[in-house]
Image: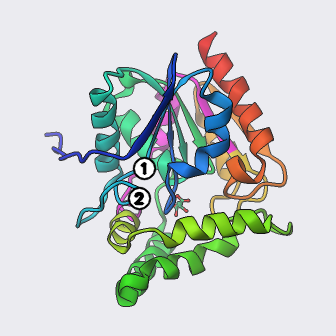
Amino acid sequence: MQKQYIPIPLHFVDIGGGIPLVFLHGFPFSGAIWREQQKAFAGLYRLIIPDLRGHGGSASTAGVYEMDLMAADVFNLLDQLKIDKAIWIGHSMGGYVALAGYHMKPERFRALGLIGSQTSADDSVARERRSQLVEKVLQAGVRGAQVVTDAMIGRLFAQGITPDPELVEELTRLMLKADPTGIVGTLKGMAARPDSTPLLPEMDIPFLALTGAKDVIIPPERAERMGEVAQTPTVIVVDDAGHMPMLEQPYATTEALRQFLESVQR
Ligand code: MLT
């Protein structure tokens, strides 16, 4: 029997018109990371940019945020907006949520794009690392966001290239706003996610894997590997970008997305 999830209302942006295009952010950010793509695509698509459960302006709840639960929140939002089918683009954890959504209701997808993300589940080392981070966040109490920010900030950007200090500051500020309850629920949910790789050969909609060439959080080889098994893949490697290509190389990333989105409509 399928598990029942109780969705919560999400804080979201709904702007533009045309084919619905959903952008899902990664952990522990918010829809704000899509600022450049929002500018570029608002005149071309109907953009739906939520803050996922426990992130940005959306509420946190106690418990484990399974990727299916977060996807159920997004379906609930799309139902509320009377959107049946959409193109889903997910960054990192947002990609895990998009994959969970595709597994649940493939008929609601026109195309699926992953940015700095992967279909693989956590291995035992990654799970252990997350569990240690959960412990540290719990011990830090209200300062939990600082713990995660310290753990992640140095690994977000292209290695070997000095990151733009304003971007470092912007993302640091965003991460420090993350709610510790949401952080813990999400870390546990990501650790529990299944391997979605078996979905790829069956996926009969356009599939994009875009990666920063210098991503050390989810290495670019993962995108290449997904491209080898997917039925209709587009694999794009953005030079001089790490885990946040949409902000580190906004022009190249947006152009690559534009081409992919155009191909979806053909
Ligand atoms: C993210 O950016 O969403 C996370 O780093 C993903 C992860 O930890 O697996």
Please name whichever residue, 69 or 247, is drawn nearer the observer in this view of the structure: 247
Does residue 196 show up magenta in the picture?
Answer: yes
User: CA gap, disc 2 to disc 1?
Assistant: 6 Å
Q: In this figure, which residue is indicated by the disc labeled 2? A: 55
Q: Position of residue 158 (x, y in %)?
A: 78, 62
Q: Tell me, for residue 247, which label it has, or none.
A: none
The type of residue carrying mark 1 is: Asp
Is 152 drawn above or below residue 17 in the view shown?
below
Res 144 → quadrant = bottom left
For the point 43% across and 84% down, which residue is it? 143
Expressed as whole percent of the image width and height from the top left, the position of residue 226 reads 61, 41
Magenta stretch? 189-210
Q: Quadrant of residue 127?
A: bottom left
Q: Is residue 27 above or below residue 146?
A: above
Q: Nearer the viewer, residue 244 or 235?
A: 244
Is 168 in front, or is 202?
168
Confirm or deny contact between disc 2 and disc 1 (CB under 8 A): yes
Q: Describe residue 228's horizontal placement relative to residue 179 as left or right.
A: right
The image position of residue 175, as x and y in percent, is: 53, 68
Q: Is 105 located above or below residue 173 in the figure?
A: above
**Left or right position of 86 against 5:** right
Q: Residue at x 28, y 63 (%)?
A: 64
Task: Name the residue nearer the viewer: 195 or 12.
Answer: 12
Residue 117 at least partly seen: no
Residue with the mark numbered 1: 51
- Amino acid type for the residue under numbered disc 2: His
Residue 147 appearing in the image: yes
The answer to whether the beta carbon of the residue marked 1 is less than 8 Å from any atom of ligand 1 is no
